[in-house]
Amino acid sequence: MSDIILHHYWESPYAEKVRRILGFKRLAWRSVIIPMIMPKPDLTALTGGYRKTPVLQLGADIYCDTDLIARTIDRLHPEPSLFPDAGAPLSYMLGAWQGELFWLAVRTVGASAPVFPPGFVEDRATMIEGGLSIERAIRDAPAQREQLRAKLDLLDTHLRERQFVLGARPSLADFSLFHPVWPIKMVPQTTAMLEPFAHLRAWMERIEALGRGEITEIDGKEAVEVARKATPRTEKRADPAEPNGLTPGDHVEVVHDSFGRDPVTGELVASSVHEIAIRRRDERAGDVVVHFPREHYMVRRV
């Protein structure tokens, strides 16, 4: 089995989601710190253009999006399970609510403290259709704080009778809902927002006690070399229920439907109801297969 390599930066909430999953699984992993903003030459040599954080690398197989990363880690390291008591569907269905919580938290933190480095907002504006408006974010900050407080209260109330979101054991739902709240706790100007929510704070401490696994630092060039020396392990696989007639060998483009509009193109290798994988060749990384979830991603023939 290939070493786990995570491309991330420490300030990323979505990377914190995966780091906590790796801690829960008690896994050793190799850490590659990527730039917060473009250019990201080592990362995009592996992904073909996808630049969101984090990205999981297993040899020459590259996994994008934390939903798929979580599913992949659990498949390869099934104990302890991220989906106890058949909780996978509900964990993923909570994604829309988690997304709302994330954006409210990030906007509130950003409006409360100078947490973003120069160029960060401009970089992220290119990833969103219609861009970003700092003036609007500042104008809307009071209303968004109230919306955020309402969501925190809902989560706190839910946790009053439970150790974890779905019951007695941690699940993907916990890591998905932990990471949007994490920056509120980490930034001194917003920490006090969590004070009224004792059950939520106790739950966060239980997640934090799981740690982040055993970490070894490597650099991006070394990770690219790992991919170049490896062979993708993904086998050609057609989806018999593919609704749009895509088959292995088709030349396709994959792009997120709303955030991060950087397309990745290549040859379709394998697809299923929840995953699509495309093969591409890079001058530095060699032959790699890049994997995406099906939800929230558009796949087109090109």
Image: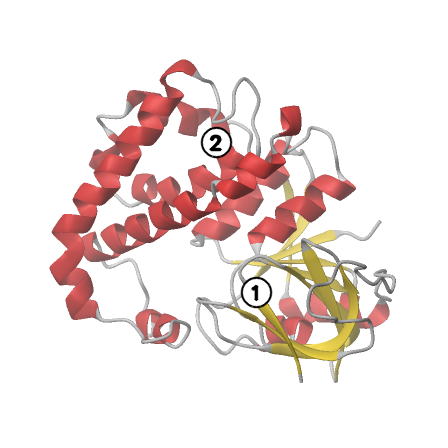
Q: Is residue 205 above or below residue 35?
A: above
Q: Secondary structure at mark 1?
A: strand
Q: Which mark is residue 297?
A: 1
Q: Residues within 10 Å of mark 2 (few under 14, many from 20)?
A: some
Task: Tell whether 154 sits left or right of 298.
Answer: left
Q: Is residue 89 above or below residue 136?
A: above
Q: Residue at x 84, y 49 (%)?
A: 1
Res. 280 visible in picture: yes
> Sequence order check: which comes first, mark 2 or mark 1?
2
Q: Which of the 4 image quarters holds residue 89?
A: top right
What whole-number distance in Å separates the C-alpha atoms at marks 2 and 1? 31 Å
State how many labels appear.
2
Task: Tell whether 285 sits left or right of 22.
Answer: right
Q: Which mark is residue 3?
A: none
- Could you tell me the amino acid type at mark 1? Tyr
Q: Which mark is residue 208?
A: 2
Residue reaching furthest to the top: 161
Q: Secondary structure at mark 2?
A: helix
- Could you tell me the amino acid type at mark 2? Glu
Residue 276 in the image, given as x and y percentages of width and height: 71, 63
Residue 50 in the image, given as x and y percentages of width and height: 57, 71
